[in-house]
Amino acid sequence: MIEIKDLHKSYKTGKSELHVLKGINFSVKEGELVAIMGSSGSGKSTLLNILGILDEADSGTYVLDGVPIKNLNETLASQYRNKFLGFVFQSFNLINYKSALDNVALPLYYQGIKSKERNEIAMSYLKKVGLETHSHHLPNELSGGQKQRVAIARAMASHPKVLLADEPTGALDTKTSYEVMELIQGINDEGKTILIVTHEPDIAAMCKRNVILRDGLIVEDKYITQQRVTANV
Amino acid sequence: MFNRDRWNEILEALSAKPLRTFITAFGVFWGITILVILLAASKGLENGVKKGFGGMSTNSMFVWANSTSKPYKGLPQGRFFNYKNGDVDAIKREFKDLLYVSPRNQLGGFRGSNNVIRGTKTGAYNVYGDYPEFIMQQPMKILKGRFLNYEDISQRRKIAVIGEGIIREMYKPEEEVLGSYVKINGVNFMVVGVYKSISNMGGDAEESQKQIFTPFTSFQQAFNYGDVVGWMAITAKEGVPITDLKPKIFDLLKSRHTIDPKDDRAIGNFDLYAEYSKINGLFVILTVVSFVVGGLVLFSGVIGIINIMLIVVKERTKEIGIRRALGATPWDIRLQILTESVVLSLIAGMAGIIFSTGIIAIANSILDGIPDSSQVMFANPSISLGIVVAALTILVVAGLIAGFIPAQTAIKTKPIDALRTE
């Protein structure tokens, strides 16, 4: 699903150059649930941004579902993001004047799907995350956990190949974190490929594979026995 | 492009901050209101001034005879001459572009002595000898009876069309006017019509209601004018300015009356077309000034929209980042911001147009309420559909301009940077 070879990325800050990714080789097969770990500054968010076509690598190759991602213009990049990727952010990033339903329907809007069909699809995903009763609530009328579930529903709505989650539990307490992880595990069980950036070991333990970054290099990449949330709670 | 979803997006975005949207819109609203009112006011002034012409054929001139100012072919300087009936025929024959050539004669005049008698009443009025087409050149309202016709001319009927001002002075109320007689310089004329003047040019509105029109031929015969023509009212066909024909007509008259071709003073004239053109030019300038001033006020409203849209884009950087992450193309974003600003300025502009037409309507009803509206140099302020369309076009263009800079700012930011913004 994801093939990355010798990925380099550096940022210029004034005169000095910050080499963030120093040659990442990494591949993810369909249906995997990967936790990307590392301390802050290790380059894990940069990696996720490149995977999410929000940022471009300086050198190296990135192939997403057989499509090489290289030198895309913004329009094409937007279309690929819409078609291939679903995003879940630490700060939820819901549009705060839109209802939960409209938020979930937004990626479908950019696919040009008609409003009736769009709302049906959005509703079915809201049902999946258990928030169908809150479909007309605005984000600020929802709790943190509920917001993140709406965000997950939104990420799923466009039926992406890969779900990218940047610290999805970073703003949540332990109990809600586990609820969100339970949802993510459920989606993964249905065969969706999911990448999670986290620095919390307990969250990483709930994934099937842990990749640890340090100073722009992968220092550890191991498959683990997944801890099911249900057993924990 | 204008599907329901996009409208919903726009309405949601605009109604998210209603107060700010309202205040922003007010700038454009105010601008367009001032633009429309200025245009309507200048139109009103134009209507008011042109009303003074009383529907007179403006492509006209009046030609009379002065004394010659140059000796010519043995004839002395300072010689008086008169136009004759033959001159009228000659002009009609030579110039096919003329619509009317009306010879006129007049009795009485400024501070004239009493010349009209009816029973025990006497009065000093202007009495004219005219052709039927004169009413086409200087329209008047026929209140009773009729105006002159060609039967009157050919049969030299002694009939008269009198002004309503005369009726007030010489008739008792409820007295039958038509069929009665008035004695003009000792000759009886039967009244066949009553007119009301609709012109107030020259400030003699009172006088112009107290005139008597008689057939030109009867006038010449009754008052011993022979074939003398006092002056002529000449109207050219539309599209041929009388000012252009004037020199040639003068040349003809000069040759017929043995006047030096270089004698510019012998033929007196008043060129209504030239005067009218001057006034017209004034109003063209006034309209341009209104457009410029109104446009500039509108422009400051547009700057307000640019300002607010920039702030909106700044505020919504993160939202735009989210949308980009979810698959919005740069064009989606640009289109949304452009339509937002166009819709905002259009709604504000239409509200402004409605508001200002409301004001114009009120102004109109006040003007209608003035009893003697002919004394007011302001009439029927209005804007044409063309101007409304022009204003709306200006608004759309303004909205596009207002949205363009913010839209560029919005798509210039990379989605990754936009998402990082807090």
Image (tube, coloured by chain):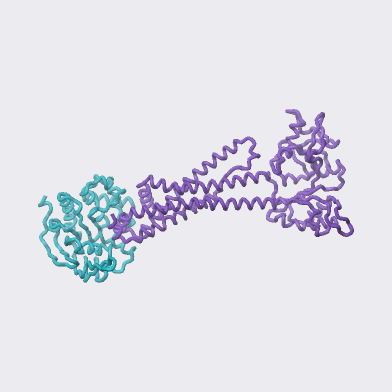
Residue A34 at least partly seen: no
Q: Is residue B54 above or below residue A183?
A: above
Q: Is residue B52 left or right of residue A37?
A: right
Location of residue A202 by image quarter: bottom left
Q: Is residue B330 left or right of residue A142?
A: right
- Which residue is depicted at the point 63% across and 38% down? B373
- Which residue is depicted at the point 18% across and 52% down? A180
Image quarter in which the N terminus of chain B is found: bottom left
Chain letter for the cyan part: A
Colour chosen for chain B: purple
- Which residue is depicted at the point 14% across and 66% down? A221
**Residue B400 appears at what percent x and percent y?**
44, 56
**Residue A43 appears at what percent x and percent y?**
21, 64
**Residue B419 appears at what percent x and percent y?**
28, 57
Q: Is residue A213 left or right of residue B77?
A: left
Farthest residue, direction front:
A15
